[in-house]
Image (cartoon, rainbow, N blue to C red):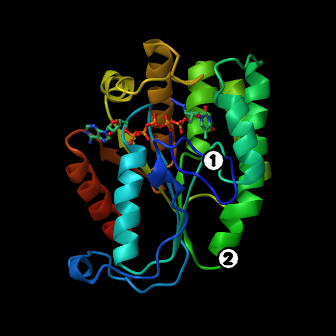
Amino acid sequence: MTDQCEGAISPPVSEPELLKQTSSSKPKESLSSSLPISQQSSSLGRFISFEGTEGVGKTTAISSLCERLEEAGIDYIRTREPGGSDFAEQLRALLLNPQTSIHDDTELLLMFAARCDHLHERILPALAANKWVICDRFIDSTVAYQGFGRAHGDPKVLDKINQLIAGFVPRLPDTTIWLDLPVYEGMRRAGKRSQADRFEQEALDFFTRVHQGFVHQATEHPNRILQIDASGNSEEVALRIWQSLSVDL
Ligand code: Z5A
């Protein structure tokens, strides 16, 4: 599970850290001198999405990045998809519920309905206020899960998704961090948790196709998507991300 949004459905008590919404205004002085970002005091909002197959460590890596942004005194919001706004969180609850049974097209359109609300209620206003937006999953997940996981990379479905992106997504991420890890390793990491949601119940073949979807996106959008090796411990992964971002910024 990932982050929560302002005023949305309360998360389980076991995930208190996910309630964090925006950066604290207090930088942690003891660590800030080691930050590699040259524009530590920059007020320009950046849109950064995180992507990857199940259990690759996005939530963990986003927490580390947010800590570093706080240390740098950068104002940000942390959010997630599907979800991130009140209405989108309601759709998320339906989409992830293992009891939900819907047609693939319905799932695709609900992902975009949620995204539309999230963009207009949360992402675009934050960027307009020069805040950074750190988003757990965005459009590349739709290509990977609905386009490749569900539709096996069918060009007609990919075309529909690209049309939805062109029609309803006025702002793409500036940078997408794709945490890349062998599918079985992510499933092993995620498997340590107790309850599987509707997507997590899918089989290895499904997640292998999802991974192909991320490979596809990284090939199509090499300037936006940074492929980051997600193996190793969480500190190593966080450092790789930070170094990649500081180069990219
Ligand atoms: N979905 C979709 O189909 N279409 C769309 O357009 C969008 C989404 C936007 C959202 O699920 C589901 O929606 C998602 C795709 C679909 N389904 N799946 N699968 P979610 O938000 O609940 O779950 P998730 O995005 O897949 O995240 P996750 O499974 O919770 O994993 P994660 O955030 O990437 O990983 P984590 O929670 O940070 O780490 C997983 C475990 O590994 C945890 O116990 C950590 O302590 C551990 N961990 C983390 N890093 C490490 C390292 N480096 N080493 C060892 N262990 C680690």
Question: Residue 231 appears in which quarter of the rendering?
Answer: top left
- The answer to whether residue 112 is above or below residue 133 is above
Q: Is residue 169 visible?
A: no
Q: Identify the disc placed on residue 162.
A: none
The residue depicted at 47 percent of the width and 45 percent of the height is 15
Residue that lies at the very extreme toward the front in this rendered image: 13
Q: Quadrant of ligand 1?
A: top left
Tell which of 203 and 195 is nearer to you: 195
Which residue is tagged 2?
A: 128
Q: Position of residue 20 (x, y in %)?
A: 51, 61
The residue depicted at 56 percent of the width and 24 percent of the height is 199
Identity, as a three-letter code, of the amino acid under mark 1 = Ser
Tell which of 40 and 220 is nearer to you: 40
Q: Is residue 237 visible?
A: yes
- The answer to whether residue 176 is above or below residue 204 is below
| Separation (CA) of disc 1 from disc 2 | 27 Å
Tell me the element at label 1: loop
Q: Position of residue 106 (x, y in %)?
A: 79, 26
Front label number (1 vs 2): 1
Q: Position of residue 76 (x, y in %)?
A: 52, 71
Q: Identify the disc placed on residue 10.
A: 1
Identity, as a three-letter code, of the amino acid under mark 2 = Ala
Of the residues under marks 1 and 2, which one precedes in the sequence?
1
Q: How many marks?
A: 2
Is residue 133 shown left or right of residue 56?
right
Is residue 73 shown left or right of residue 33?
right
Q: Dots 1 and 2: beta carbons under 8 Å?
A: no
Question: Residue 159 appears in which quarter of the rendering?
Answer: top right
Q: Residues within 10 Å of mark 2 (few under 14, many from 20)?
A: few
